[in-house]
Structure formats: C-alpha cells, structure tokens
Amino acid sequence: MHPRQIQHCNQCGTAVEHRVPEGDTHARAVCPACGHIQYENPRNIVGTLPVWEGRVLLCKRAIQPRYGLWTLPAGFMEMHETTEQGALRETHEEAGVEIELDGLYCMANVKPVSQVYLLYRARMLRPHWEPGPETLEARLFGATEVPWDQLAFRTVRETLERFFAEQQTGRYSLQIFDID
C-alpha cells in the first residue's frame, strides 16, 4: 500500500474519500460532494542513451534527487508530447546535444515509485554538447570508464550494463525489466 497523495477534489476542493468506486477494482480518490473520481497513475520518464563512437554520454546531476551523481539524459514526459518528443526534449535540455533516435531500447518498471522508464538508443550527430541548468557536466564513457559507483539510479546501471553487453555483439534488442 502506498501513501495517499490526493487529499482534495481537483474539481470542487472538497476533502476526498479513498474507496473502491462501483464497477472498479482499486481504491480511488472519490469526492463525496460532486462525485468526481481522481486517478493516480504511474509517471513516464523518457530519455536516451546518446552514443558517439561506442561511448555513452552521461550527465552529472545539478538537481535533487541524487545531486552530483551520473545519469542518462532523461526526465518526466510532458503532457501532449510523444515519448520520442519527450526523449529528444530531455536530451536537449540536459545535455544540449544533437541526436537522432535509433529506436526504443529500454522499458523499465520502477514499482516502488510508480514510474515507467522509456529510453531510446540515440546517435550523436557530432561530439559536441552543452549541459543545461540541470547538469553539472556531461562526458562520454566507454564500458570500462563508467563511474559505476557514482550512478544516480538503478535503472541507469541496469540499462548501461545491458547496453554495453549487447554492444559487444552489435545486435540490440528491446530490454524490459522491473525494479522492485
């Protein structure tokens, strides 16, 4: 059971009740005044594995959580954008790098925080980047150069391990995994 995030109706402001609405199977935030039902759903994180000559571009975080640790350029998907658009936007915002997407590479379900990561392989169009305000620095890393003990998230570690293992063969497949 997770803590209840929704406390008040976003339609009329009344304190909500958490109960299973008729015809549903999960407890929801239900307004006793106007009957509006609010749903809490997982958040999508979109981003890329930008690659130049076999090395992956990582960003050192300038924000919390995990300030000062390394990650792939990624962030929350915005309303009214596709996963591809979000991945491109996040990569530009965090790394300031020009890329071309090579297809979806990873879908990771991070159950404890109700997030779904969608990461695309990406070709850097040139070896130039300009980190944005959420990034302290960005740098290319080969498999043996990655600061494995300084990675911000388990999803990043798992994705990089899988990517570098597949890089040996030159054949990439969609990686789907859960983090409990």
Image: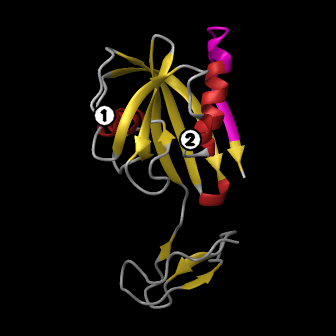
Percent position (x, y) of residue 167?
62, 14
Question: What quarter of the picture does the N terminus occupy?
Answer: bottom right
Q: Is residue 18 above or below residue 78?
A: below
Residue at the spot 60% in from the left edge and 59% down from the top edge: 113
Question: Is 175 displayed left or right of 48 in the figure?
Answer: right
Question: Is 81 displayed left or right of 151 in the figure?
Answer: left
**Three-letter residue code for mark 1:** His
Q: Is residue 167 magenta?
A: yes
Q: Determine which of the numbered discs, if any, sits on residue 21 in the image.
A: none
Q: Determine which of the numbered discs, if any, sits on residue 151 in the image.
A: 2
Residue at the spot 66% in from the left edge and 77% down from the top edge: 20
44 or 20, which lies in front?
44
The residue segment tinted magenta is 165-177
Which comes before the other along the chain, label 2 or label 1? Answer: 1
Residue beneath disc 1: 92
Element at badge 1?
helix
Q: Is residue 94 magenta?
A: no
Element at badge 2?
loop
**Number of other residues with Cα within 10 Å of mark 1, as a class: few under 14, some 14 to 19, many 20 or more:** many
**Three-letter residue code for mark 2:** Leu
Report which quarter residue 111 is drawn in: bottom right
